[in-house]
Image (tube, coloured by chain):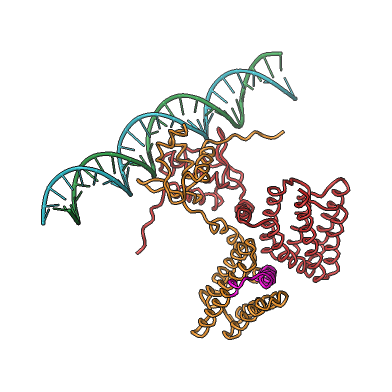
Chain colours: A red, B orange, C green, D cyan
Amino acid sequence: MQTIKRTKLYEAVIQEIQKMIASGQIKPGSKLPPEREMAETLGVSRAALREALTVLEAARVIEIRHGSGAYVLDVNDELLLRPLALVLLTEKGTVIDLLELRKGIEGEAAYLAAERATSEDISILEKILDEIAAGVAKGGLTVHEDFKFHYALAEATGNPAFTKVMNVIADAFHQGLRTSHGMLIQLPGRRETIVKEHRRILECIKKRDAEGARQALREHLERVEKRLEDWASSQ
Amino acid sequence: MQTIKRTKLYEAVIQEIQKMIASGQIKPGSKLPPEREMAETLGVSRAALREALTVLEAARVIEIRHGSGAYVLDVNDELLLRPLALVLLTEKGTVIDLLELRKGIEGEAAYLAAERATSEDISILEKILDEIAAGVAKGGLTVHEDFKFHYALAEATGNPAFTKVMNVIADAFHQGLRTSHGMLIQLPGRRETIVKEHRRILECIKKRDAEGARQALREHLERVEKRLEDWASSQ
DNA sequence: ATCGAAAAAGTTATCAGACCACCCGACCAC
DNA sequence: GTGGTCGGGTGGTCTGATAACTTTTTCGAT
């Protein structure tokens, strides 16, 4: 015999609103009916309705604009995954731990990308590499461009699980850099060397040298690790 | 020029409550002050206070018991990690995709475990292997025991990032098995072979043969993959 | 003295109504 | 074309009340 769980009214209201959204009755971007109207339609007080709306807003399902109404947001996976980066960072682990994990995953991703990348994947990677080189010529390599390269690599595996998990870990890694290294934009390292490392990864992928791609990527991350340690000991 | 974001009152109230919890003033398991008292202390109406509490309850930070009060819950990482497992499962990927990802991560984990496992780690792994062998002698290998072995392996890396991410992926994997293969308890495969595979992994770890541990684990997962494919084509 | 039932006190849950703050569109003046 | 004002609609917050639930205290029976 289980205890009977009472349903809180706001939870029931949330369910009704979620139904409206899931059924397509209210599409992303469009406005829910006014609060007073919805409260009457659902047969609840406006206070109960507002509690439900507030929860949905905090969960980024809707956005409530004062004087205008409640709008359904376009939900994407990134919002769902954000807490995970937090978990990885609050533990006693460090960005070095995350780098170690990245070596395992991204080494495997580079291997699979070398086996499976389409010509479109490769031209995307080439374009990003050009952006990296241009950024370096102008003064630095940004976290954003580095992220794009690694993301495109994950996509080239053709395995969505890699994309998702690598995204989360890279996000945690970059947040960790900001927190523990006070770095907002720049990755440490000799600029020309960084371009060369990324280019070597891409060359292995183009040549379909899977094992070489794995090694190139692992060595790249090992050098990032060394640079972080050097940077840390210089502070 | 940025748009100016107005702060909603419930958000400010949430922050105050989070401060009370984070400062240790209110510990997990204990009760927040009564609503009317808190509303007065914070200088807001009870309705605004309730909106904030409702959000915190929906986020599992607190539990509100009717007639009793609001209690601070003991937050654990599992709740935060759940979305990733969900995302991995709702995507077009399959359990084969997850196995591929596991090969990269767990191969690396086996490598690091072989380098770093303490004698305690090793005796835990041995104990779990004994349980696996006993289970096999009695009639089958359960998902639960398999999970324990892989979890202990992640722990032996000494890197918390591995533990967390491997947990999530294994969770998603096993859920995926249940959904797509209708298997609740048993892993497919010849029973004695499975024990041997796990034992080979452990022997490599004990001998500190890191590369051997990596290979043993990858081969184990490759055989799981083959068994799943064989099983699928027999349905 | 102990136990169980009832009453009292404390707390949350929901409602209703009021007033304030903001948004948006229409219209007018320059 | 731009800025200002107005009116209507909508959200934001408050106050006060009643209902529902939990916990503590009191009281009567044994």
Vertical relation: A207 (above or below) D26: below
Residue B13 x/y as whole percent: 51, 38
Residue B142 x/y as whole percent: 52, 76
Q: Is residue A3 left or right of residue D27?
A: right
- The residue drawn where x is 87% and y is 56% is A193
Residue B147 x/y as whole percent: 56, 71
User: Who is closer to the viewer here, B151 or B101?
Assistant: B151
| Magenta segment main secondary structure | helix
> Does residue A14 appear in the picture of this structure?
yes
Vertical relation: B42 (above or below) B86: above
* Count of numbered circles on the image: 0
Residue B226 x/y as whole percent: 65, 79
> Does residue B55 appear in the picture of this structure?
no
Q: Which quadrant, please, contains the N terminus of chain B?
A: top right
User: Who is closer to the viewer here, B175 or A200?
Assistant: A200
Q: Is residue D9 left or right of residue B169?
A: left
Quarter where residue B190 is shown: bottom right
Quarter where residue C26 is shown: top right
